[in-house]
Image (cartoon, helix red, strand yellow):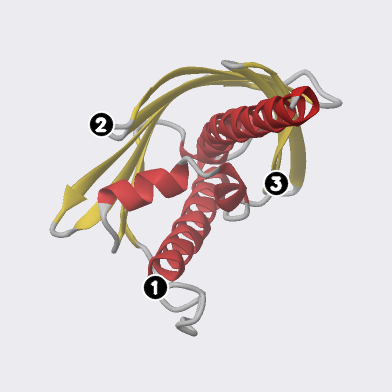
Amino acid sequence: MTVELMHEFDIAAPPDTVFDFLLDAPSVVTCVPGVTIDEVVDESTFEGSLKVKVGPVTVRYRGSGYITAVDRDKRVATIRAEGEEQGAAGTVAATMEMSVVEVERQSRVTIRTDLAIVGRVATMGRGVLQQVSNQLVGQAARKIESRVLCSEQGPSTGVDAQAPAARSVAAVPSSSPGSTELAVGALLKGVVVSWLLKTCSKLLFNVERFAARTRERIDG
């Protein structure tokens, strides 16, 4: 089954702040349950898993993702992901584009997904899939906005992390709605890779600088 999905939600924070948060993997992963990164293969390839419950069925996908583009100026990121269902014959492949734009002094996050899915999830009724999809996107949007607003106001403000709720502009799948959680999971896996690569680069730079200083002391 081939599906095109569109989801949008608003966050009451500047677009650059929101986009930077969405590229901060540890923060984003805590907003969507069931998403993990297992291994970073190289600078553009990663492996991970996603565990979700759809109706009476709980499924876990393992697969690879490829970061195809990140444009900070335009606040757009594109990810390609492919996975297989563990313990069954299901598969999933997705190409996702995430964008953040300013709308009425706040940020609108749009996730567009072209997805092909085979297996148990594809056979679920549209009503069940719609419910799961909307719940996941809604929970993630609320948590993301709470985290963004708390980070803007600082740790000492005493802001209730549950207070602000993101406005869901549209959770409108153009075909089967139930696979949005897979698209969000693959997107987050790409975000995690970006953060890991930046962190590793900083660590290597610090190690090299320490080694150089040590050699200078010995030579001196």
What amino acid is at disc 2? Asp
Mark 1 crowdedness (10 Å alpha carbons): few <14, some 14-19, many ≥20: few
Amino acid type, callout 3: Gly
From the top left corner, tell me how far across and down residue 60 is, in percent.
Answer: 76, 35
Whether residue 53 is visible here, answered yes or no, is yes
Residue 29 on image: x %, y %: 61, 47
- Mark 1 residue type: Gln
Q: Nearer the viewer, residue 137 or 151?
A: 151
Query: What is the secondary structure assignment of the residue under circle 1?
Result: helix
Q: Which residue is tagged 1?
A: 153
Eyeballing the image, is 48 above or below 139? above
Name the residue at the bottom extreme: 158
Q: What residue lies at 45% left-to-right and 70% top-to-bottom?
A: 150
Determine which residue is flagged by label 2: 73
Relative to residue 184, is residue 162 depicted above or below? below
Q: In what element is the residue under mark 3?
A: loop
Q: CA distance from mark 1 to mark 3?
A: 28 Å
Q: Is residue 188 above or below residue 32?
A: above
Disc 2 packing (10 Å; few <14; some 14–19; many ≥20): few
Q: Is residue 91 visible?
A: no
* Distance in Å between CA atoms under marks 2 and 1: 24 Å
In the image, what residue occupies the spot 13% across and 58% down?
A: 104
On residue 34, the disc is 3
CB-based contact (under 8 Å), mark 2 and mark 3: no
Whole-percent x and y of residue 163? Answer: 44, 79
